[in-house]
Amino acid sequence: MLATRHIARSVFRNVLRPVASRSITLESAPDVVFPEDALRPPLTILSEDETVIRDSTYKFAADTISPLVREMDDASQLKQSLIDNLFEQGLMGMEIPSEYDGTDTSFMSAIVAIESLARIDASVSVFVDVQNTLVNTLIISLGTDEQKEQWLPKLATDTVGCFNLTEAGSGSDAFAMRSTAIRDGDDYILNGDKLWITNSGHAGLFLVFANAEPELLKTNPKKAYKGITLFLVPGDAPGLTVGKKEDKLGIRASSTCPVNLTDVRVPASAILGEYGKGYKYAIECLNEGRIGIAAQMIGLAQGAMDITVPYTKERKQFGQSVFDFQAMQHQIADVHTQLEAARLLCYNAARLKMAGQPFVREAAMAKLYSSNVATLATSKCVEWMGGVGFVKDFPLEKFYRDCKIGTIYEGTSNIQLSTIAKLLPY
Ligand SMILES: Cc1cc2nc3c(=O)[nH]c(=O)nc-3n(C[C@H](O)[C@H](O)[C@H](O)COP(=O)(O)OP(=O)(O)OC[C@H]3O[C@@H](n4cnc5c(N)ncnc54)[C@H](O)[C@@H]3O)c2cc1C
């Protein structure tokens, strides 16, 4: 078994590992300037390595995840064997450097992998997305050498992480959080209740935002965000408990739970990044994370179209395939066009981020638009399939349920619009 795992891992890694060295990554060249006559690659043309990752991840999803989707949705539970497999495939530590046992790919490669997974199951996609674009990213960019050595090899190989920002009273207004971190000698004592925490049901590491200067909440609430600090809390820390899983409309297999912290003691060395900078890290990493959610939404919309359009070509009414009615063709062409536009926004935001260029507005536009397109595409696909689109024996109704979350998490659509409006070039 171990030998098989090793071979599976090394086969995938042999494909993925060389990515960092071979691909034309712009990450290390923020000031890149193309000569006037240089041929710029079109956004939809991926590098050879990105193509391999997109296609091999899709094949894995179609072969291995697809047969489990219905069962996991019904049970509201990801199968542990699948979680193990995602680690074995290197999908849980995509941007983690190889020295920490990670797959060492680029951000763009992680984005196309998230998209490919969502074509089959949006729950698995967000499971991988949160690990890569929120948890791993924060530790890679902010961790001390000791923190990286302690956590990155685990996150790449067997430990699920989760991102604990939201609370009952602080959703869109995340920095109104009430969770506290009180200094006690060399330690901090954490108390608070987090809500809606993706992957918490499986997590061995909790990234927790808490206010280390809670008196500011009373004396100067507008400045209270300056106390927000980010802590690395092991899943087995005494006083940390994960509550009952939410019973959700969509992405049902993804675990979303409340997390309670009662007198959880962590050493000061568990602070990730700088004291009091948690608000900044949350904003920055959610900006990046939104590109991941955009990828999840375009993958999901594509998955619905992959099933529906061939069906419309096979399904005959009035003596011809329903696809051959111009009324159907025009609608399908319209949704396909919007899906392509959403993909371009998503890939452009990812490329800007990799090039070290400003990408906040573009990430917000990508998430906003992709979730709108996913809502439209899945609704239309249900319609185009007729009655079979509406029943659980076929996968369409699940795509329709799963898409709704795209307009809510990592900033609702209104919040994306506010971000875009703030950054308009006028
Ligand atoms: C399935 C799921 C998974 C999640 N995973 C995580 C996770 O892993 N970690 C985590 O920390 N959080 C997570 N969340 C929380 C998620 O990010 C929040 O639900 C989201 O930010 C919205 O907050 P809220 O639910 O409190 O809505 P509210 O903030 O109460 O918003 C309600 C409505 O008011 C609107 N609104 C609010 N403020 C404004 C404004 N200023 N202008 C205009 N409209 C406004 C919103 O757009 C929305 O329509 C998850 C949520 C869900 C449902």
Image (cartoon, rainbow, N blue to C red):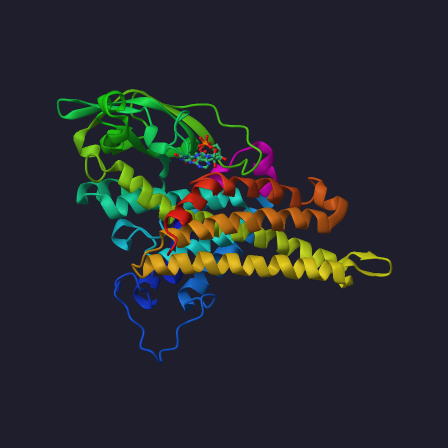
Can you give x and y, in whole percent of width and height, for residue 260 in the image? 36, 22
Residue ranking furthest to the left: 185
Foreground residue among 392 and 164:
164
> Magenta segment: does it hold 258?
no
Quarter of the image where ligand 1 sits: top left
The image quarter containing residue 207 is top left
Measured as percent of width and height from the top left, residue 248 is found at 55, 31
Say whether residue 317 is left or right of residue 109: right
- Quarter of image, res 319: bottom right
- Residue at position x 29%, y 25% in the image: 237
- Residue 221 versus residue 392 in the image, above or below: above
How many tags in the picture? 0
Which is nearer the eye, 353 or 76? 353
- Residue found at the far right of this picture: 319
Q: Magenta: predominant secondary structure element?
A: helix
Name the quadrant of the C terminus: bottom left
Residue lying farthest to the front in this orientation: 426
Residue placed at 71% from the left, 48% from the top? Answer: 383
Q: Nearer the viewer, residue 381 or 186?
A: 381
Residue 242 coordinates in the image, percent (x, y): 40, 25
Instruction: Give the image location of residue 144, x and y in percent.
Output: 19, 43
Q: Tell whether position 74 is magenta.
A: yes
Residue 118 visible at all: yes
**Most foreground residue, 140 or 406:** 406
The magenta segment is 69-83
Q: Is residue 240 visible?
A: no
The residue that appears at 41% across and 48% down in the rendered structure is 421
Determine the image quadrant of residue 311. Answer: bottom right
